[in-house]
């Protein structure tokens, strides 16, 4: 979406109005033209509100008056914050929001120079995704065995999460019609991007049992809804409900570790790569926009191979 020209922005009055308008135009741009999710846009909004607050304290009232010194002052304030200390990942995200806004201002001709172009985010320690073993996953899935309607629902949900690598938000947002021919599911990821993912035989069987034996009974308890997964009162299962379902299954499986909905996604990717899947295929299945995001899972697999080699080879140590 095009933003107002420098002149029209300059006609605004009031200390914070010009900055607020420029920020709002950027947020509309990333939401509409780039299709970013509501959660991401709200994170940008919070980050840029903090930045605008510092600029106001420094007497900056117009985007064109911001200098690299102001950007550096914001980065320094984030590092030295003591009342609410920030993790390196949070600082990186906030500075990324600032850099994105300044690039937008330059691209739209609102400013002549991108004063944030040289700002450097703090280096992040690479965190490897946490995956559980195939045997541990089998134990969690077996913990949902049962013939009551709640067990049938829980089994279908957890089998689907592991079979497809879906984010929990994607899984609970599914409608019945998103199951295509029983063996393919249509997922809607970040920014409403759609992808098609195959569904394995175990998940297909669990979902079919749920649709035939459990969902009709659950749907009678609430108003009509196309949602695939229904709660006890007949409404769509929420992300919080899904988290509780997973935690309960892990407790019954006696894993001795805490797992989350994302554990299923991480395990899906790791187990595929360990089984020989191409990283770009896994990228497509996960809905990652960049293969670099997916490649972190190859490091998990490499670490596993290294551990096995060190343990098994007579001259490894």
Image (cartoon, helix red, strand yellow):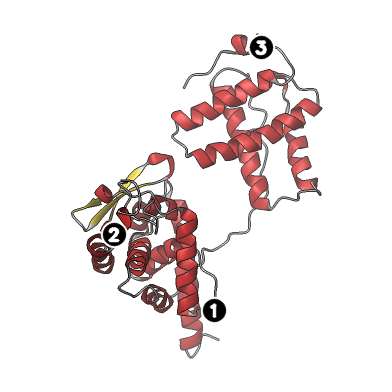
Pointer 3 local density, CA inside 10 Å: few below 14, some 14–19, many at least 20: some
The x, y position of residue 224, in whole percent, is: 31, 46
Under circle 1, the secondary element is loop
The x, y position of residue 185, in whole percent, is: 28, 53
37 vs 188, left or right, is right
Distance from Cα at disc 2 to Cα at disc 1: 34 Å
Quadrant assignment, res 281: bottom left
Mark number for residue 12?
Answer: 3
290 vs 198, left or right, is right
The x, y position of residue 209, in whole percent, is: 24, 66
Q: Nearer the viewer, mark 3 or mark 1?
A: 1
Q: Mark 2 vs mark 3: which is more N-terminal?
A: 3
The x, y position of residue 42, in whole percent, is: 57, 37
State the residue at coordinates (24%, 67%).
205
State the residue at coordinates (80%, 46%).
80
Task: Look at mark 2 in the image and give the residue it sits on.
Answer: 217
State the residue at coordinates (70%, 18%).
62
Mark number for residue 256?
Answer: 1
Image position of 126 with respect to 86: above or below: below
Image position of 159 with respect to 78: above or below: below
């Amino acid at each position: 979406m095009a933003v107002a020209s420098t002149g029209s922005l300059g006609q605004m009055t009031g200390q914070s109005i010009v900055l607020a308008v420029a920020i709002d135009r950027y947020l509309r741009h990333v939401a509409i033209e780039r299709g970013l999710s509501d959660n991401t846009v709200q994170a940008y909004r919070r980050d840029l509100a903090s930045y605008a607050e510092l600029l106001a304290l420094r007497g900056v009232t117009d985007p064109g008056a911001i200098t690299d010194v102001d950007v550096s002052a914001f980065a320094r304030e984030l590092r030295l914050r003591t009342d609410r200390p920030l993790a390196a990942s949070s600082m990186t995200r906030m500075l990324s929001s600032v850099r994105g806004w300044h690039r937008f201002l330059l691209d739209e001709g609102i400013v002549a120079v991108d004063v944030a172009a040289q700002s450097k985010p703090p280096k992040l320690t690479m965190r490897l995704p946490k995956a559980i073993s195939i045997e541990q996953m089998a134990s969690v899935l077996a913990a949902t065995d049962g013939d009551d309607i709640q067990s049938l629902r829980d089994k279908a949900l957890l089998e689907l999460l592991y079979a497809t690598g879906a984010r929990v938000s994607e899984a609970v947002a599914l409608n019945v019609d998103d199951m295509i021919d029983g063996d393919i599911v249509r997922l809607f990821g970040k920014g409403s991007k759609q992808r098609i993912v195959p569904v394995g035989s175990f998940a297909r069987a669990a979902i079919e049992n749920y649709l035939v034996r459990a969902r009709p009974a659950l749907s009678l308890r609430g108003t009509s809804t196309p949602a695939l997964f229904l709660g006890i009162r007949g409404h769509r299962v929420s992300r919080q409900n899904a988290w509780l379902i997973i935690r309960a299954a892990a407790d019954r499986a006696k894993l001795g570790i805490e797992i989350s909905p994302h554990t299923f996604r991480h395990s899906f990717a790791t187990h595929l790569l360990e089984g020989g899947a191409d990283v770009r295929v896994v990228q497509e299945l996960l809905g990652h926009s960049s293969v670099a995001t997916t490649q972190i899972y190859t490091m998990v697999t490499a670490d596993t191979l290294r551990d096995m080699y060190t343990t098994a080879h007579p001259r490894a140590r």
